[in-house]
Image (tube, coloured by chain):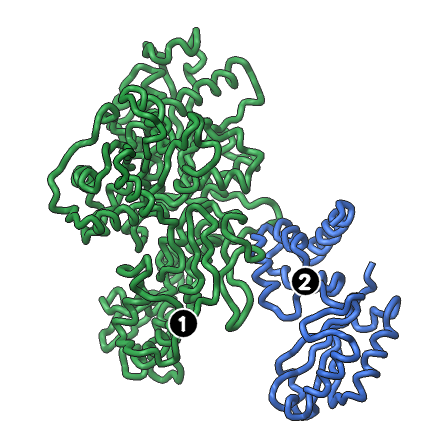
Amino acid sequence: MLLTERERLHDELAELVTRYGRDRSSLLFILQEVQRRHYHISQYAMQVIADLLDIHPVEVHSVVSFYSFLDERPQGQFVIRLCRTITCDMAGKDHVARQLENDLGIKFGETTPDGKFSLDWANCLGMCDRGPALLVNQQVHTQVTPEKVHGILQECRQTFGVHATSDGRETRT
Amino acid sequence: MAKPTPTAGVSTRAPASQRSRTAEMLQHAKAMGKTIEVAIDGSPIAVPLGTSILEAAGQLGIRIPTLCYHEDLCLAGVCRVCVVEIEGQRTLQAACSYPISSPINVKTHTSKVRRARRHIIDLLLSSHVGECYTCSRNQSCELRELAAEYGVDFFRFGHVQKPRYEIDASSHAVVRDMNKCVLCRRCIRTCIDLQEVGVLEALYRGNRSKVGTFLDRPLADVVCINCGQCINRCPTGALRANDPTDEVWDAIDDPRKHVLIQTAPSPRAAIGECFGLEPGHAVTFELNTALRRCGFDRVFDTDFSADLTIIEEGVELLLRLKRALVDGDASVALPQFTSCSPGWVKYVEHFYPERLAHLSSAKSPQQMFGALLKTYYAQINELDPRDIVTVALMPCSAKKFECNRPEMCASGHKDIDYGLTTRELAKMIHEAGIDLLKLPKSGFDDPFGTATGSGVIFGATGGVMEAALRTVVELVTGLKIEKLFDHADVIPVRGFEGIRYAELPISQIGPVPELVAHLFDNWDFLKDVTLKVGVAHGTANAKRVMEDIKAGGRFSQCHFIEFMACPGGCLGGGGQPSPTSPAIRAARA
C-alpha cells in the first residue's frame, strides 16, 4: 500500500473512531463501516483500529474472523450469498448456483477479476417458504430461478457508479 | 499505592482476573445486608449474594470438576464440565459462572449430571488429537484426569486421528500444538487479561474456531514476550516449552564436552513439586547431587552472578544519578529499569521502544554467568570455550529465547547454550532413575561457589529491588542496612501486591568502599537525596507503571524500578511446574 493511501486510511479510521467513540464497544460499528466502504478490512486497518481503540490487534482479527459479513480479503462490490440449506437445496439451488458461476465466470468463494462480484454460500436466510433464496449485499431475492439470475446481475451492473449508494454503500473512492 | 492512570478518554480493558471477586461480593452483601441460604447436596450454607455455586461448594468441601475455570483468570464458562443440577430448573447450570441470587437446592452428582459430564468430556476428547504416551503432559494433564475420573471408557463421539494443524515450533520458548487444544481459552485469558500482552485470541467460528495469533502468524513473528504463563495454565499439552533436553543429554554423553549447569533459586524452590513435595520445599542441595549424577561436570549457583548483576545495576544507577544530579544532564534515562527478566525486556522492545534507554545495560544473571564460564572459567581451567556447554536451569521460558538472542555472544561463543525449565530438568532426573528426595546433600562447585543472600531473594517479586537497595545504601552510606530498617527485609518493597513504591532517604555519606570509591571524586551529591523506587510484577502491572510514567505521575519521579514479566516474579515463571495459583506461588517465596 502506498504511503499516501495508508495515511488516508488512517485519517479515515481516526474519523470513524471519533464518530463512534474510543471504546472497545464501538469496534463492530467501525468494522461494519470499513467493510461497507472498502469491501474488506485490511491487515493495516485492523492494526490501526486496534491502536486507536487501545486494544490488541489480535482482538480485532478475532472479531473480523468470527463474522461472515466481515472479510479479511477484498470482496466484490456485490457479494452474492446463495442459501445452501435444505429447503433451498430441494427447491433447486444447484441450478441457480451453476447459472451464477456461468454468468460470472467464477466459483463460489471467489471474486471476479474486476472486483465487482463475489460468490459465497450462506446458511439459512429464513426464506424457506420461498426458496431458493439469495442475498445481494443486504437485499434478499426469493424464488430465484436460473432465468432470473441474469436480471439480478444486470440490475447490479446498472447500479455502478454514483447509484451504488442505493443499497447503503458508498461509491468506492 | 499508585492507582492506574487511564489515559484520557480511553477505557482500557481491565484485567478482571486481578480483581478479587470475593472481596467485592462481601462488600456488596454488606451494603445489601444479604446472605442467602442454599443447600448443596443437602448441606446448608449461607453465602453472600452473588457467590458462585463453585465457591459455595468449595467452602463445604464438595469438589466440582472444572476445566476452563482458573483461579488466576476471569470467568469464561465455556467448557461446561462443572455443570450441576438446580432443583426446579429445566437445564443444568455451570457452577463456576452461576451467581447465587436466590435460595436454591443444588445437586452436584445426580445421574443426569454425571451423564452430562461424561458426554461433555467425550465431546472434548472427540476433537483432541494425540496419544497420551507421547505427550509432554502425560502425567499432569487435566483432561486425562477428568476422563479417568468420569469413567470415559471409549470414544462415544469418535476421536480425530489425523492432526488438523501444523505444530508451531517457530518460537524458541513456546511450542503450540493446536491439535491438542480443547478451546478452554485459559491461554487467551492469560495473554489478554492477566498479562495484557495480547498475542492469543479465539479466531474464526464454530467447528473452525481455534486459538490463534494476529493473522494466524507463527509465534516467533508476533509480539509474544515468551513469558510462558499460557503454558502454566494450559490444561492439556497444547502449549509447551521448547524442550532441549535431548541436546543436553547429547552434550553430557559426549566425552569431549565439559558440561556446566547453573541453577537459579526459583526452580530449586519448586522442583520438589515434580517429585510429590508440597509447594515451598527447597531441595537445593539434593538437586546438586542429582545434577552430578546426571552427568553434569560442574554445578554452579546463579546467585553468584545475581550478585554481579546487582553490583552492575547499582553502579549504573549511581552513574546515572550523578549525571542527572551533578552534571544536570537532562538526557539521562531515569528511572532506570531492571533488565533481568527477558520477558519484560521483550515487552519494552515491542510496546515501549521509546523507553529502551531506561533499561539497565547489565546482562541478566543467566547470561553473565554464561559469559564468565566461557571466558574467565575457561581460562583458569585451561579449557577451550568451544568444548564448554553451558546449561541454565531457570523457572522461565523466556530465558530460552534470551540465550538464543544473537547479541548474547560477546565472547564469540554463545553465553548459554541451553536453557532448561524446572519441568524439563525434573524429567531428566526421572529419566536418569534418580530419586531426588532420597539423595545426600552436596554443595555448589567453586570458584563461583560463595554468594551473599541477595541472589536467593531474586526470584521473588521485589527481590532484585531489595538486593539493589541494600547494595546501594551500603556502598554509599557505609551503614549496614540493618540499621536503616529493623531487619534486612525491606518491607515496603517485598510482597505480592501488583505495584509497589518506596522511598529511602540517604542521610549520610559514609566511608565508600575501595571497589567503587574511584567512580566519583566527591560522593556528597547523594547526601539528602531520597531514593525513590518502584516494583511491578506481571506485565499488566508493568503497563500501569509505564502509563503512569508517560503521564508524568509518581513513577516518573522514581530512580529505579524493578519489573518482572510474570505474576509473582520468577517463582511464578512460565517454566515452573503446573499447576499454578496464588497460594502455590506464595508458598514458593
Residue B161 is left or right of residue B378, and the answer is right
Residue B456 placement (x, y as % from top left):
27, 33
SS of the residue at dot 2?
A: loop
Could you tell me which residue is drawn at 88 percent across and 67 percent down?
A: A162
Q: Is residue B401 above or below residue B258?
A: below
Instruction: Give the residue furthest to the top.
Output: B521
Label 1 neighbour load within 10 Å: few <14, some 14-19, many 20+: few
The reply to whether residue B105 is in sight is no
> Amino acid type of disc 2?
Arg
Q: Circle 2 sits on which residue?
A: A73
Chain B colour in the picture: green
Q: Which of the labelled discs sits on residue B17, or is there none?
A: none
Chain A colour in the picture: blue
Chain under callout 1:
B
Between B365 and B134, the one lying in front of the other is: B134
C-alpha separation, residue under disc 2 versus residue under disc 1: 32 Å
Q: Circle 1 sits on which residue?
A: B161
